Image: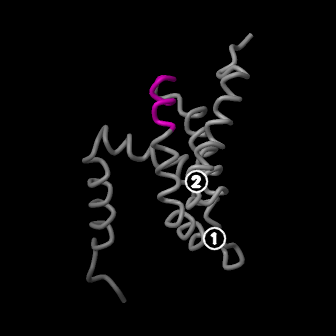
């Protein structure tokens, strides 16, 4: 039988904590805060690369990053989808909080990899530059 990740007391405590934080920060949209929290929980529950303690310690930075990056992420999703689809801020917060910590951790482990990939994609654009007909 699998052990539960969080006891019911822990879930109730996290719920009360979330509601308290939401009440203390009226300038943050409640939908964005809830979506960023769920995105961070998706990161915690699905990422098996890090230990459980590290994943729980990354929960708060993931929530903060999701709230901060929500407008940018929502606009990128809107640009990438058909014209009828407009991503709202909570969707941007959900996606950003689930992804941004993973991206930053991979960047921290090998910062040169991002620059090498960017450089190779830019140089591939310019290869065979005079062959346009």
The front one of 24 and 51 is 24
x and y percentages locating residue 126 in the rendered image: 28, 73
Residue pictured at 69% horizontal, 20% vertical = 7
Q: Residue furthest front?
A: 24
Where 131 sits versus 71, above or below? below
Give the x, y percent position of residue 61.
45, 43
- Residue range (magenta): 51-59
Give whichever of discs 1 and 2 has the lower sequence position. Answer: 1
Which secondary structure is most common in the magenta stretch? Answer: helix
- SS at circle 2: helix
Q: Answer left or right for 7 relative to 44.
A: right
Classify residue 89 by image quadrant: bottom right
Q: Which mark is residue 68?
A: none
Mark 1 = which residue? 81
- Farthest top residue? 1
The residue that disc 2 covers is 95
Q: Is residue 68 above or below residue 14?
A: below
Q: Residue at x 62, y 42 (%)?
A: 20
Q: CA distance from mark 1 to mark 2?
A: 14 Å
Q: Quadrant of the N terminus?
A: top right
Give the crowd class for mark 2: few <14, some 14-19, many >=20 residues within 10 Å: many
The type of colouring in the image is one colour
**Residue 39 as seen in the image, left or right of residue 4:** left
User: How far from the left and from the top, in percent, is residue 85?
Assistant: 69, 73
């Amino acid at each position: 039988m699998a052990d539960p990740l969080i006891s019911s007391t822990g879930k109730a405590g996290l719920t009360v904590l979330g509601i308290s934080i939401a009440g203390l920060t009226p300038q943050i949209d409640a939908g964005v805060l809830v979506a960023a929290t769920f995105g961070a929980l998706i990161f915690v529950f699905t990422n098996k690369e890090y230990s459980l303690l590290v994943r729980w310690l990354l929960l708060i930075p993931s929530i903060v990053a999701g709230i901060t990056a929500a407008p940018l992420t929502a606009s990128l999703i809107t640009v990438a989808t058909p014209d009828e689809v407009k991503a709202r801020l909570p969707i941007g917060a959900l996606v950003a909080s689930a992804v941004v910590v993973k991206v930053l951790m991979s960047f921290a482990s090998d910062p040169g990899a991002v620059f090498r990939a960017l450089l190779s994609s830019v140089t591939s654009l310019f290869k065979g530059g005079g062959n346009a007909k």
